[in-house]
Image: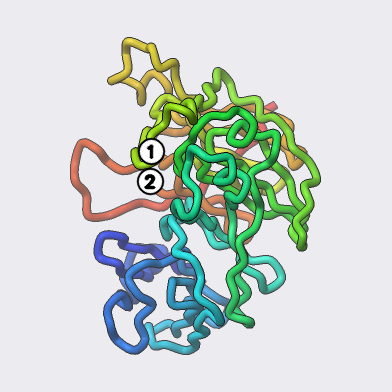
């Protein structure tokens, strides 16, 4: 249909344009009106085959027609936790046989980051059933992950997952842990494989000693490497990542140039094919696969404020 959906997070507005950038819809549903989806989206919006726009928020499941009129609303059957996250392409809502999958992180509750129980009960994803109006949190941290067996303290952001779906499998990478976890997409989501990812010169987050960590403070490890986005594209898995850096590095104020974000190309078994430099004009977090094609958001211009963005259609070519 040659349509783009963009979310202006600053104003809470969903925007639809054509491929030439002409505005077709400016949908502001974040207020108190009857058809409002509230102030916090849990998913990016999607265009359905009937040209309707679907999304998920803390108020449930919404569908709007191409003019922004409410066509369907299914509230949650039961109260659901307040999920942390962002409605963006790097936190994509993925569909499999009518079930929707999304990041499902929640803040500290009964346990805090200095306790074993916190990591034992920590879950990475949520699956939504739009027909039943339900949200079920799934996928615990693996027992042999550093978050559970190192006796160190980690922040939520250091366990922030990325994931993708291919056929009947969920591919999940948990934050700074450089392992690809493969799960059966059907309940109870059995772990099928766990494989170390061969990121070049990667620095795993070390966390803090749990006995010394302050449960009320945030001690984010800026030196830790991490995976930002994972997508299944044709015969590949594509991960955007940053390798991290030695915390003793004297050039700590020049990290972006010295330790640039990059791409790792893998096969569906998680075996490395090649590490690729990320073109400077592409954002390291924001890319999508649509109808077998790869689309990328332009990198934010940090030198000059701009009131536009660019979208790139990208190909990965095997040069022999």
Tell me which residue sits at (63%, 74%) in the image: 129
What element does badge 1 sit on?
loop
Q: Quadrant location of residue 248?
A: top left
Q: Quadrant location of residue 181?
A: top right
How far is the residue under mark 1 from the one under mark 2?
6 Å
Tell me which residue sits at (45%, 39%) in the image: 155
Image quarter of the C terminus: top right
Q: Residues within 10 Å of mark 1 (few under 14, many from 20)?
A: some
Q: Residue furthest left?
A: 304
Query: x, y percentage for residue 305?
Result: 19, 46
What element does badge 2 sit on?
strand
Query: x, y percentage for residue 225?
Result: 49, 28
Please report contact status of discs 1 and 2: CB closer than 8 Å, yes or no: yes
Considering only vertical position in the picture, is 15 above or below 59? Answer: above
Identify the residue position indicated by label 2 in the image. 298
Considering only vertical position in the picture, is 154 above or below 39? Answer: above
Which dot marks residue 281? 1
Closer-to-camera residue (55/1): 55
Query: x, y percentage for residue 203?
Result: 52, 22
Q: Indicate which disc, 1 or 2, sits on the residue closer to the N terminus.
A: 1
């Amino acid at each position: 249909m040659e349509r783009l959906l963009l979310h202006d997070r600053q104003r809470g507005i969903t925007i639809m344009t054509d491929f030439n950038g002409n505005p077709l819809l400016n949908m502001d549903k974040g207020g108190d009106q009857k058809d409002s989806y509230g102030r916090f989206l849990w998913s990016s919006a999607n265009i359905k085959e009937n040209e309707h726009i679907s999304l998920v928020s803390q108020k449930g499941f919404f569908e709007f027609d191409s003019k922004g009129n409410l066509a369907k609303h299914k509230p949650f059957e039961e109260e659901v936790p307040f999920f942390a996250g962002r409605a963006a392409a790097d936190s994509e809502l993925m569909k499999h046989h009518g079930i929707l999958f999304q990041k499902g992180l929640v803040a500290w509750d009964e346990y805090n980051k200095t306790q074993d129980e916190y990591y034992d009960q920590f879950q990475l994803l949520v699956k939504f059933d739009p027909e039943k109006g339900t949200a079920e949190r799934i996928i615990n941290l693996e027992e042999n992950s550093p978050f559970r067996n190192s006796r160190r303290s980690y922040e939520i952001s250091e366990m922030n997952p990325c994931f993708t779906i291919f056929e009947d499998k969920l591919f999940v990478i948990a934050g700074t842990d450089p392992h690809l976890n493969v799960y059966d997409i059907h309940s109870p989501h059995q772990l099928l494989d766990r494989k170390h990812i061969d990121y070049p010169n990667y620095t795993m987050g070390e966390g803090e000693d749990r006995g010394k960590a302050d449960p009320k403070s945030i001690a984010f490890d800026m030196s830790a490497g991490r995976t930002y986005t994972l997508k299944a594209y044709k015969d590949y898995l594509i991960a955007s990542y940053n390798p991290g850096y030695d915390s003793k590095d004297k050039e700590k104020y020049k990290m972006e140039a010295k330790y640039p974000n990059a791409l790792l190309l893998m096969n569906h078994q998680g075996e490395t094919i090649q590490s690729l430099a990320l073109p400077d004009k592409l954002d390291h977090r924001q890319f999508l696969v649509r109808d077998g094609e790869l689309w990328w958001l332009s990198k934010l211009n940090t030198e000059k404020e701009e009131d536009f963005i660019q979208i790139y259609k990208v190909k990965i070519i095997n040069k022999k």
